[in-house]
Amino acid sequence: MAVNGQELPPERKNLVRELLCPQLLAAIVAGGLFAFTIAVPVKLPDADSVKVTKTGIEAVDPLLNSAEILEKVKEKEPWVLYEKGLTKEAMAAAWKAARDNKKRQDAAWNMAIGNTLIRSDSPRDRWKGYVVLEKTILKHPTSQYVILNYARQLYYGGFVEKAEEQYENLLKLAKPEWIEPRIELANLYLVDEKTSRAIEVFNQVLEQKPEDPRITKRLGLAIAVNGKKEKGFETFVRGCALESDNLDYPPEIKELIEKNAGLIESAISDVRQKVENRPEDIDLRVTLAKLLIAVNRLPEARKNLKDALKKRESVPELHELMSEVLFREHNREEALGEFSSATSLLPLSRPAAPAEAYAPTIEDTAEEAESVAPPPEEKKADEAAKPAAEGEAAAEAEAEAE
């Protein structure tokens, strides 16, 4: 028998088959994340990567544990429309997909629906979005990128404690070398005034990626927030220097460049156009500043950041980036001032608590239940299999009676 493409030695086949009985796998899915040992710990395959059948263990869609699923989410119509600034059309597309039984069987579609709806101004839309995302997690409780997406959306909506819980659950599954969720959790601790824990996690990540500019800069901010401003600033500018010397782009910038056929100028033009279409979107301005810093167009980056600060002076990342620009321009004194502003604002940048919860109507809950019901073809298959299963159970009972 093969598990995850590897043939197990004969002496372990029976043990694994017993461990992965349908009842235990159901318990894993129902109960969430847990670990156990029998004499020597046995690593079970991910509940989302295998399923138990009468003939053994079958692999299921590997997309569920791949970063590719996040790209699939971005390709779905609701999110594409939202990214284009067509918010009304995006919400309509998300609701349409949410009522589509076939789409609701697909994790990427559910994530796209949820990610879109929670960005609405409507409490009902946001309620629906989080319901869809939560059900996706319940269906795929050990799919690492599904958990990561859910944690990010919880944080976006101001559910900080719930987001921390999801990140912490994810780190129980994730290998130490997967640093993205660890960095995100450390950043979350930082804005949630759990600075010592943030420093601890940043240092753990640096053990995996020593001298990483991005992590070094964030560690510097955490050290300063923890009361050691000068030491924090020195750590921060060391990260800035590392990035400049190594010509190392942050991951999100690398991704943008790749999407623009490897041309950074094309990426800059694309983001600049989006900024013009959505001038109030501070995240876009942050992205544009990072792109300009990456190609050392510092005066242009500084101007973009000044424009952004006029709109939202309380955003710590704008001050952080301005500090980096000024440091690279050899203006250490002003760079320290912007760094101090960033560190003073960080604990205050926790997302606003969610608004009053929406109370779903009977029609809302009935519609949601209908949307996620098994498709007709699956119902027919289940009904066809039921008599056979009942017959097998009866035969087993007779055999036991004898």
Image (spheres, helix red, strand yellow):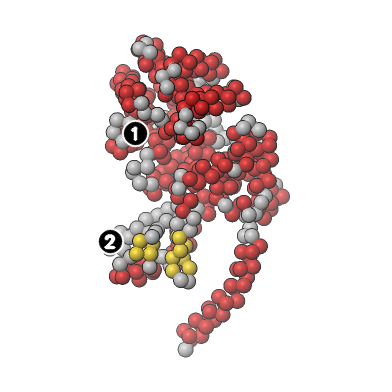
Q: Position of residue 347 (x, y in %)?
A: 44, 26
The numbered dot on residue 229 is none
Instruction: Quote the CA–CA distance across marks 2 and 1.
Output: 32 Å
Q: Is residue 223 visible?
A: no
Q: Considering the numbered disc 1 on the image, is that residue within a helix, a strand or a loop? A: helix
- Kindly identify the residue that appears in the image at 68 percent across and 35 percent down: 88
Q: Considering the numbered disc 2 on the image, is that residue within a helix, a strand or a loop? A: loop
Circle 1: residue type: Phe
- Kindly identify the residue that appears in the image at 49 percent across and 81 percent down: 396
Please identify the quarter of the rendering in which residue 35 is found. bottom left
Neighbourhood count class around disc 2 (C-alpha, 10 Å): few under 14, some 14–19, many 20 upward:
few
Question: Extreme right residue here?
Answer: 363
From this view, report whether residue 79 is shown above or below residue 339: below
Q: Nearer the viewer, residue 177 or 81?
A: 81
Circle 2: residue type: Val
Q: Position of residue 28 (x, y in %)?
A: 45, 58
Q: Position of residue 153 (x, y in %)?
A: 53, 39
Query: Badge 2 is on which residue?
Result: 40
Query: Badge 1 is on which residue?
Result: 202
Please identify the quarter of the rendering in which residue 206 is found. top left
Q: Nearer the viewer, residue 400 or 82?
A: 82
Residue 146 located left or right of residue 95: left
Residue 156 located left or right of residue 50: right
From this view, report whether residue 362 is shown above or below residue 125: below
